[in-house]
Image: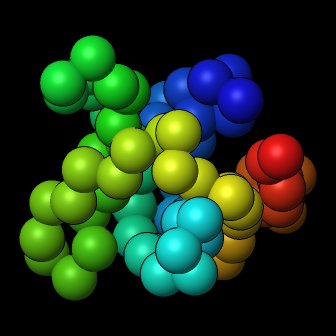
Amino acid sequence: MHDYFEIICMRLSHVTVTLDDGKQHSGIAQNIVKLDNNEHLVLLENNKILNIPLNKTETLEANNNPIPKHNFKVIFN
């Protein structure tokens, strides 16, 4: 799981993340940080920084990136 997030951050990929409560967030992956002993994806969404807990992520989709091979979808759990 962690490797997918590292890759999207390295590439500054455009992603859509679906959380286990059904909420979706789309933006540019920036970094992975540790907050309260949990890893979070730092996502730039509409010029706002969001910290999205990796352990609450159900789906990660890299989309609309200029290199087609950099677009993928992963379903966790």
**Residue in the image at 58% along x and 53% along y:** 57
Q: Nearer the viewer, residue 4 or 36?
A: 36
Where residue 69 appears, as percent x and y from the top left, is 87, 52
Residue 63, position in %: x, y? 69, 71
Residue in the picture at 66% in, 76% down: 64
Q: How is the image coloured?
A: rainbow
Asked where in the image residue 3 lies, by quadrant, the reply is top right
User: Horizontal placement of 47 versus 62: left or right?
Assistant: left
Which residue appears farthest toward the left when viewing the image?
48
Q: Toward the viewer: 40 or 43? A: 40
Total tally of numbered discs in the picture: 0
The image quarter in which residue 37 lies = top left
- Residue at x-position 21% and y-position 59%: 50
Give the image quarter of residue 6: top right
Picture layout, residue 53 above or below residue 31: below
Looking at the picture, how far across and down is residue 11, in whole percent?
A: 53, 40
Quarter of the image where the N terminus is located: top right
Where 65 sits versus 21, above or below? above
Horizontal relation, residue 61 to residue 45: left or right: right
Residue 48 x %, y %: 12, 70
Question: Which residue sits at x=71%, y=61%?
Answer: 59
Q: Is residue 66 visible?
A: no
Q: Would residue 47 be found to the left or right of residue 44 on screen?
A: left
